[in-house]
Amino acid sequence: MADIRLASVAKHFDGVPALHPLTAHIHDGEFVALLGPSGCGKSTLLRLLAGFEAPSQGSLMIGDTEVANAQSGQAVPPEARNIGFVFQSYALWPHMTVRRNVSYPLEVRGLGKAERIAQTDAALQATGLEKFADRMPSDLSGGQRQRIALARCLVSDPQAVLLDEPLANLDVALRASMQDVFSDFHKRTGATMVYVTHDQAEAMAMADRIAVMFEGRIVQLDTPETLYAQPRSTFVAGFVGEGTVLPINGIERQDNITRARLYGERIAIRTDADHPNQICIRPENINITETGDLRSIVQRSTYLGGRYRLTLQLPNGALLKAESPERYADGRQLGLSIQMPWAFTEA
Amino acid sequence: MIAQKTAKGSRSEDRLLSFVLLIAITVTLTPVLRLFLEGVTAQDRFSLSLMRDVLGQDSTHRALWHSLTTAGLGTLVSVLIGSTFAFLVALTDLRAKAALVFCLMIPMMIPPQITALSWTQIMGPSSVLLKTIGMAPPLGAPQPLYSPAGIILLLGVQHSSIVFLTLRAGLRAIPQEVIEAARISGAKGLRVWWQIIVPLCLPSLAAGIAITFVTALGNFGIPAMLGIPAGYVTLPTLIYQKLAGLGTSVLAEVAVLAMLIGFVAICGILLQRFFQSQQRVHLVGSSSRPLAIALGRARLPIEALLWMIVAVILLLPMLGLLATSLVPAYGVPLRFDTVTLSSWYETLFRQPATSRAFFNSFSLAIGTAVVLIVICLPLAWLMERNPTRLGRLFDALVDLPYALPGVVLAIAMILLLINLPFTDATLYGTIWIIFLAYLARFLTVMFRPIQASIRQLDPAMNEAAQSVGASLWQRLRTIILPLSAPSAAAGTILVFLTAFNELTVSALLWSSGTETLGVMIFNLDDSGETVMASALAMTIVLVVMALMAAIQLSARNLPKGVVPWQT
């Protein structure tokens, strides 16, 4: 296993930037998710790590080896990087049995037969595929095919495992159980994993850290908890956990408590910025009280099971998402108090 | 009210479908059926004695053996050239692929008798080109192409694009991820090719080999131009010689020979369909991005090699042809004082036979294209809308008259039309028999592109027109025709191109006054007028290349699968 270092890595396609220069360090044994809407550059970044694309700028290290350097033009081809890659389409070889699919990386490396069989069996066992070993991939279901792909990438003990939206082709129920498979696999092997997804729940559930990407940039790289509690931009606040972002002004600091003015009302905020100008309001930051200072009108309430999600409109037209155990009729006036929202600076 | 109208609409569609299908089946499949009947009857009774006689003759055995060896080894040459190009073009980062593919396709579109004529112009003692550069062998030296080896080489060159096209289509169906997965597993270069790519494209390669063999087997132009002077007879040339020498009295005998070659061809076609169906359904995956494995430092030498092959199989023979067409008499070297356009002038404007051939081929090609578009457009659309069992059967058999060797169809046509039922009239010897044969043979050339484009149409377009009350004819005219017009136009050009160049069918069906261009070149060369034959051939090559370029330029506006060399 190894860590991955990106030093101002950028990628252009025919002069059009797909990735702006980015620098990051993925630690040894870490599970990092690349999260973002489609077209944000997350797959491009993954293909750069794998070596299917070469960076237009910057350099890339896996472990102690520099695998790509745009300046010197030096690049280790994908077949020499010792990396596992799980494709969205599984990319199994339809003309080989499950066993041969899994053992192929060992065959290529010229391992002895006994060793090959032992390692292949171990990989098949780890993914629960022993009894399908002699079937063809086309006979198996989507979830089983995904396990073959996983077994194939772990059999050669790779330095890092890259996963490109591996669950996108599976149904919802299977997706949840495969998430557990990936998490268990990560815990057991301690492999460095980079996981591309556009589904924030998937990223939150599995990753140690999440790199949120937008328009070819990593806009924030943090643990799931930090991302949720302390977003640093309107995009992250809105993309992760449905936060509402509202402008604030009039910052005052007193006895370790920072206060700001939200539409004229004074509220206490959390922040680490000197001059925050935006707050991110999550449902749990909102208390519905008859006496609340902030007036709002119920626009819609949606039953989520056990609770309702309310869409509330403030007098100036801004919309807030709140949660409540009871239903409120549309058009009803509610008073709100905002509890310690996170504030950040947006240029 | 509305429900009534829809029901009526679909009834009128049913009626039209049956009607058009009936015409199409009559045109394409009855000749083949008629041929089969002739082979197994004698004096209107079931008998196999004639068949036994003909199949027992030594000349039959020899011709069959010659056909099988030339077609078999010719296919091998095609596989060598075609698969080399297919692998390199489909998998690597070669530059100028489109130009390379276009040049490789030209030999397929140039009629075989012209291929043969042009190659003989760059070899042998009387080659104008060799004389001009002073490299001609001494007089009396044999023409090396008048031999089995010459036939094999040219069959191989002529059909290498068939292997290329089927194999490339198979390679394109391989998802890119499957190859990336092999690389990330540590496999590189030739290992990926051998262990992943080759097994996956094997069925399409096998299908390509089978259909190339069938096409080579039915080729008449090359063994006729090269084999007849050498006394080397294949089945198609044997049929031609018998019919040309003895007339319709040997019709029953050549019918058996035609059935023999038809039988071998059908085995090949079935083999091809089997392999095509074996093409594995790939596990999910996109093949949208074309592969471009970096060749690195080897790229330039490989590109040079491929272009050199193209130059040898395309440019050199064309130069030979051009040189021959520019001298005053065959055997004269080409110099500044000998160069003349007199043979061009003679061929194009003076000779009544060639002008007649131009007129015949032109009207046959146009007529065939127009009639086929009228049949195919409603047929393709209706078959797509209401799939019936008859329609599916037709779909499976429509390729037969085109895939079967031309001599088979020609003999079948003679049998069918020599005595029109209930009359004393005959169509044999008129231009109409050639016309009907062309309709049968080229129906699929028009039908497939139109079918491809109609399959990609959203059915809602027609339903929307139906919902606002457009009748069947209104919908055909205002919705279906404009939407499939680009493919129909491409199909028209293709039919025109193939019909304009056709030799095999017309070689057996022509008579004085109904010669086609293909026959004309063959006859001119046969009677020693090689210079005029070259001028005529050169004209045709220029027409072919212009039409191909026209299709190529409009390719961007055509649906996928319409331009045959852009699968």
Image (cartoon, grey):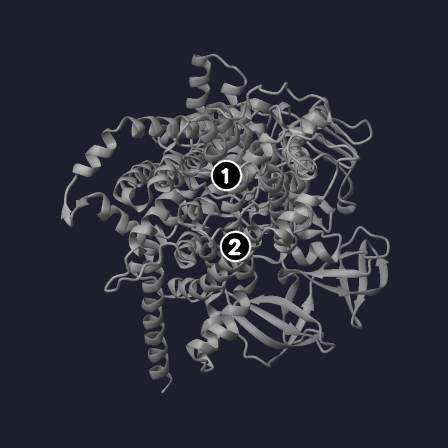
- Above-or-below relation of A160 to A166: above
The location of residue B543, given as percent across then percent down, is 62, 50
Q: Is residue B349 above or below residue B295?
A: below
Identify the residue under disc 1: B162
Q: Quadrant of the C terminus of chain A?
A: bottom right
Q: Report the front residue among B319 and B478.
A: B319
Tag shown at residue B200:
none
Q: Is residue B180 left or right of residue B274?
A: right
Vertical side of B382 occupied by B12: above or below: below
Q: Residues within 10 Å of mark 2 (few under 14, many from 20)?
A: many
Quarter of the view holding residue A143: top left
Amino acid type shown at disc 1 = Ile
Mark nearer the N terminus (2 vs 1) = 1
Looking at the image, which residue is at 63% across and 60% down?
A: A242
Q: Position of residue B342 (x, y in %)?
A: 70, 44
Of all chains, the one bearing label 1 is: B
- Please report the residue visible at 60 percent of the width from the left and 76 percent of the height from the top: A299
On the question of residue A341 being in view, the answer is yes
The spot of residue B437 in percent (x, y) is 40, 54
Q: Position of residue A156 (x, y in %)?
A: 53, 23
- Residue A139 in sight from this viewpoint: no
Residue A284 placement: quadrant: bottom right
| Mark 2 lies on residue | B361
Q: Is residue A76 left or right of residue B438?
A: right
Mark 2 is on which residue type?
Ser
* Residue mark closest to the camera, 2 vs 1: 2
Q: Is the residue marked by circle 1 packed among few (<14), some (14-19), or many (20+) residues within 10 Å?
A: many
* Quarter assignment of residue B308: top right
